[in-house]
Structures are given as C-alpha cells and as structure tokens.
Image (tube, helix red, strand yellow):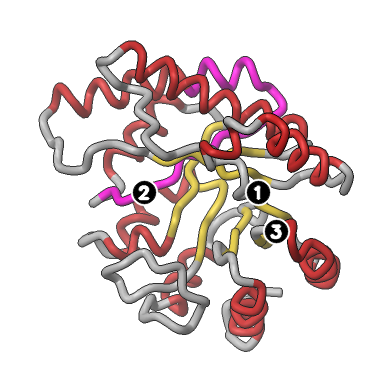
Amino acid sequence: MKYYVIPNLSELDKYLKLASDYNLGFEYNDFFDPNLLDNNEKLNDTISKYQSLKRKGDTLHGVFYDITLDSVDKKIKEVSLERVRSSLDIALKLNCKGVVFHTNYITWMKDKVYQDNWVKVHKELFLKLASEYKGLEIYVENMFDLAPDLLARLMNEINDERIGVCLDIAHASISPVPIEEWFNKLSKYIRHIHINDNDKIVDSHMELGKGIIDYKNAYKLINKLPDDTSILIEIRDYDKVVNSINYLKGSDFKCF
C-alpha cells in the first residue's frame, strides 16, 4: 500500500525529501479553502508551485465547507457544484489520480425522503462528474456519519470502479459503530484511507499513537484490503508526520 502525506509549501523541501525517502504521495490540502479559491492570483501561484514539481499520482482533498449538492435551494446547489468542479479542475492540472469529497449529509435527518434524495442526487452527480473527468477517481469520505450504511448504499447504487470510499478511521472511531462494521459494510468500495489519532470524542488529528484509537486492530482490517489502496497520514505538522511514520515503522502493522 502506498502512503501519502499533506505537503506544506512553506516547508516543501522537507516534504519532498520525506516523500523520496519513503516513496510517499502527496494529498494537497490547500484547495478546499474558499479564501484561496476566490483569490485568483494566490490560487494560480499555488497551483504553479505544485505544477513545477512535475509529480503524478497524488491526491487532492476537495472542497467541503458548506457544500450541499442535494440542497433544495437551486442557488446553493449550483455554487456547491461549481466548487466541486473547481477541485476536479485543479486535480487535473496537478496530474492527480483522485479527489476526496465528504458525504456532508445531516446525520440527524433519518427520514426516508431525505436519505433517498441524498443518495439519488449524489449518485447522479458523481456519475456525471466521473464521465466528464475521465482521468480522475472520486473518493467519498465519511465525515461525521454515525454509521456506514448510507455511504454503503450510495456506493452500491453507483457501482463504478472509479468512484469509491475514502474511509477516515478517525471519523469512524468517533461514531457509535465499531470499526469492524465500517469495514464489513464498506471494504469492497474502499480505495483510499485517512489515518490520524484522537480521543474518540474530538476529531483532533493527533499524531499516531498519541490518542486511543486501536490501530493494531484497525490494521488487521486494513491489511485485508487490496494492495493498491492508498493511505494518507492526515496530519499537517511535519514533526508529527515523522513521528507517525516512526510509529508505523515500529509496529507490526506491515507498513514501510
């Protein structure tokens, strides 16, 4: 399995060396910020700096702030889709292999009408986008979903090999559902994984080994996935990324 880290332009040399040392991919986290997206000069400069690296096969975290593709308000839906397309456009410019989007549904809305509409709208839009952006995969990430069922239903109805799940282990660990059930329901759809640690209460993005997530158990499940599944160490501080790599190296998780 290939591991990824989040590059920081202000420390790019360090991240490039780390990537070289461990054959790491990058997952770009700059471009979900609406302030950057609305500043054309800064946006183009950021894209150009990453383009100059001439990398391939990286991933990009797509927009998620206030994104509501299933909104009943036509204008909100249009802006949400515009933002989603911006993520896909930038990913193509950076020769990425895939883009991560959050589920972004209202978890306490459990009525059938709401959930049916959420699945219907996202199925139609993701299939449409996948047909338009043929060079990219789309990964749908559990945000603060309380259970894997709705995401599993979406993937089952989509049934497209270029649209899969990004399973965020830390997010799943905050839910009331055991991690085993997340894998049982989603494993055949998982293409990408996010890992970091927390106290199972707050999504604090701690370095690995500093929280209470049972990664020994999680890796028993991760290691059953196909070898081409990619894994992001979703931590932004360089030293904590290095500590997390050392944590994985010092384990029996079959990493690195």
Q: Residue at x 72, y 47 (%)?
A: 58
The answer to whether residue 64 of the structure is visible from this angle is yes
Q: Which mark is residue 143?
A: 2
Q: Which mark is residue 28?
A: 1
* Residue named by callout 3: 7
Residue 140 higher or lower than 202, as above or below: above
Q: Is residue 111 left or right of residue 68?
A: left
Quarter of the figure that contains the C terminus: bottom right
What's drawn in magenta, residue-wise? Answer: 126-145
Mark nearer the N terminus (2 vs 1): 1
Residue 213 higher or lower than 138, as above or below: below
Q: Is residue 132 magenta?
A: yes
Spot occupied by residue 108 in the image (x, y as percentages of width and height) = 15, 42
Q: Where, by quadrant of the figure, is residue 141 drawn?
A: top left
Q: Residue at x 51, y 20 (%)?
A: 82
The answer to whether residue 1 of the structure is visible from this angle is no
